[in-house]
Image (tube, rainbow, N blue to C red):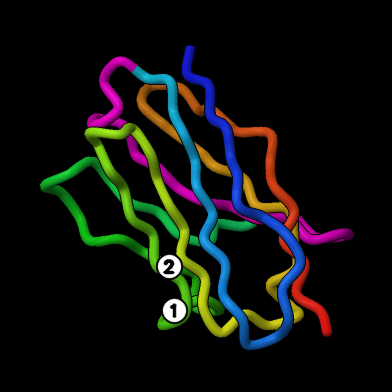
Amino acid sequence: QVQLVESGGGLVQPGGSLRLSCTASADRFSIYTMAWYRQAPGNERELVARITPIGRDNPEYADSVKGRFTIIRDNVKKMVYLQMNSLKPEDTAVYYCYARWVSDFWGQGTQVTVSS
């Protein structure tokens, strides 16, 4: 069983930045594929960014966030981050940390609101 705890959400003005953090309780964190998803009211949950275990594929991003968001993992600290720059009102959503190795694991989510 893996527990994921997100932090770093909040209210930010358009054009601003936030960094989300996710702490994982996994014995072998480095073998997990990690990702960030988001869900806005009335919408389905969507993939924002995904990073595979170290040494494998490059990170992938949703087209809507390419060039603005960066996913980073720290296998020593067992953490994954989502650096979000140039935020837009349409980025407003609950952001979820996700881990996968054999099974899927989800965090509880953190609210990000982009508004003036």
Q: Which residues are magenta?
A: 27-44
In the rendered image, the residue lying farthest to the right is 42
Taking the image as shown, residue 71 lies to the left or right of residue 45, namely left
Q: Position of residue 59 (x, y in %)?
A: 30, 61
Question: What's under tag 1, amino acid-wise?
Answer: Lys
The question of residue 30 being in magenta is answered with yes
Extreme residue in the top direction = 1
- The alpha-carbon separation of the residues under discs 1 and 2 comes to 6 Å
Q: As displayed, is residue 27 above or below residue 62?
A: above
Q: Residue at x 63, y 87 (%)?
A: 15
Q: Does residue 32 appear to the left or right of 66 in the view shown?
A: left
Residue 33 image offset from top left, x and y in percent: 34, 39
Tag 2: residue type? Tyr
The tally of labels here is 2
**Residue drawn at (53%, 29%), measured in percent from left and top?**
4
Q: Residue at x 72, y 59 (%)?
A: 10
* Horizontal side of residue 87 vs 3, given as left or right: right
Query: Which residue carries the number 2 mark?
Result: 61
Note whether 2 is above or below 53 in the view shown.
Answer: above
Number of the label disc, if any, that sits on residue 47: none
Q: Quadrant of the C terminus?
A: bottom right
Residue at the disc numbered 1:
66
Answer yes or no: do the residues labelled 1 and 2 have beta carbons within 8 Å?
yes
Q: Position of residue 44 (x, y in %)?
A: 75, 55
Q: Secondary structure at mark 2?
A: strand
